[in-house]
Amino acid sequence: MSDFPVDGVAVRTPVPAARDQVARAPYRWRWVALWVLLAAEAMDMLDALIANVAAPSIRADLGGGAATVQWLGAAYALAMAVGLITGGRLGDIVGRKRMFLIGALGFTAASLLCAVSWSPGMLIGARGFQGLFGAVMIPQGLGIIKEMFDGPEIGRAFGLFGPVMALSTVGGPVLAGALVDADLFGSGWRMIFLINLPLGLLALLGGWKFLPESRSTQRPRLDLAGAGLASLAALLLVLPLVQGRELGWPTWTFVSMAAGIGLFVVFGRYEARLAGAGGDPLVVPGLFRKRAFSGGLVTGAVFFAAVAGFSLVLSLFLQSGLGLTPLRAGLASLPWSLGMVLGFAAIQVAERFGAVERFGRRVIQAGIMVMALGVATLAVTLNAAGTGMTAWYLAPALIVTGLGTGLVMGPFFDTVLGAVEPHESGSASGTITAVQQLGGALGVAVLGTVFFGALGGRIAGAADQDAGTVVVAGYSATLQITLWAGAGLLAAALAASYLLPRPVLAREPRTRDDG
């Protein structure tokens, strides 16, 4: 669930002074409306996960090179990152219910475009539209929930997002594999997108019928120039990382990456100047003076890059390396998902005893180290098993890797946002979530490039798999190299995490500047 600028929720009385005197009746259909929002969240999460499982089948059908496989995930994450910057603010301006319906309609239409795509380029473009409309749809939930619920109910409402996210994480890869293997009506991989049509229709009808009208009382202006700068900077950074290896790393790829980094600097200065002139910047510049927030951005970008890249290369290895069907590959990745659920559960228990607040960044650091241990164990397992490798050998290391992932993701956002002032929370939440998505796009690009580079650009074809001539040793060695690169990303995330808030017992009285 992403946080966005939703301070000043709309009320039904025109007299501000009456707010504290008249108790507002709870919205009648609030729990039904909540399930509409949860269904939309699940639909978005599933589409972020399932493309990795279906990627080998998609490439076998539509053709394209290794970059096509990378773009299937990167296009979605990149468009989501760009859209999240402005998606919540559009809800504040024109109404959250309206933007939710527009997002759901666009997401459903984009899913249909994905399903009927006849070329890699068309599918990648449709995936981008999916991510963009998902970024319009998802952020509206926070403001609507705040409008519908009060008191203890709001905590229970937000508490339902955890189980939905966990179920989507566990079930997504298996569902994708089952749909591809089932080949319903000869649809093959296309069914993973066609299934969004009834789900999207239900979200549209449910949103139209049960979601209340919701709009911010303070209508900010839309920073189109800032959004354009951020979008172009992200594209200039990700594009050469995905395409560079296949093109032989021409000069323009390095120029593009340098230009992308430079544009992010220009974006920061523009936002600071806009805030100084009394405008409404996408990102509140003062946030970057807080060590906890700045450190959280760096930690999150690198960590989520490692997670997204790991998910891609694991799926490629299971299918192209071990020759598993999409369904069996989804089942083989279940230990990682189950480990994540265990990590989330452990954080929930720790929060009940105040351990997360007490130990601060040490919880996140422990999670990063546990995940790194799992990744290293997986690499050692691959080396030891050799050509006798089976999916069962991977399970223990995948559980440890998932456990570490959950231990980081559980407390991450609360820890990073803990030093943010209330009036900065909307901008901060939107920024950290957008950086999470951007990190995912970069991770797919970087670790995907390492994987395909080590492999020499060869992806096992369906004919090879049918003939039983899949070369496990080559893919095993390739995955080992990629895993050590992923461990390097985790080491960088661990180093950045020292900018996060220190444990309560180990730090001096907290000030606003030290995060």
Image (tube, rainbow, N blue to C red):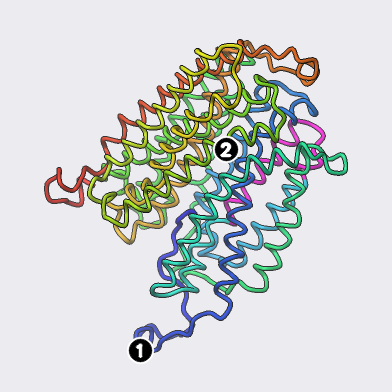
Number of labels in the image equals 2
Question: Closer to the camera, 498 or 351?
Answer: 351
Q: Which residues are magenta?
A: 113-137
Q: In percent of the image, x 52 and y 24: which residue is there?
A: 446
**Label at residue 62:** none
Q: Which residue type carries mark 1?
A: Gln
Q: Secondary structure at mark 2?
A: helix
Q: CA distance from mark 2 to mark 1?
A: 52 Å
Residue 105 horizontal/vertical position (percent): 70, 58
User: Where is residue 249, by image quadrant?
Assistant: top right
CB-based contact (under 8 Å), mark 2 and mark 1: no
Q: Label 2: which residue?
A: 334
Q: Nearer the viewer, residue 219 or 242?
A: 242
- Residue drawn at point x = 49 percent, y = 24 percent: 257
Q: Position of residue 443 (x, y in %)?
A: 51, 30
Residue at x-position 50% and y-position 15%: 481
Q: Is residue 46 left or right of residue 429?
A: right
Q: Which mark is residue 21?
A: 1
Relative to 419, is 124 above or below? above
Horizontal side, residue 421 vs residue 10: left or right: left
Judge from the rendering whether residue 208 lies leftward or rightward of residue 394; answer left or right.
right
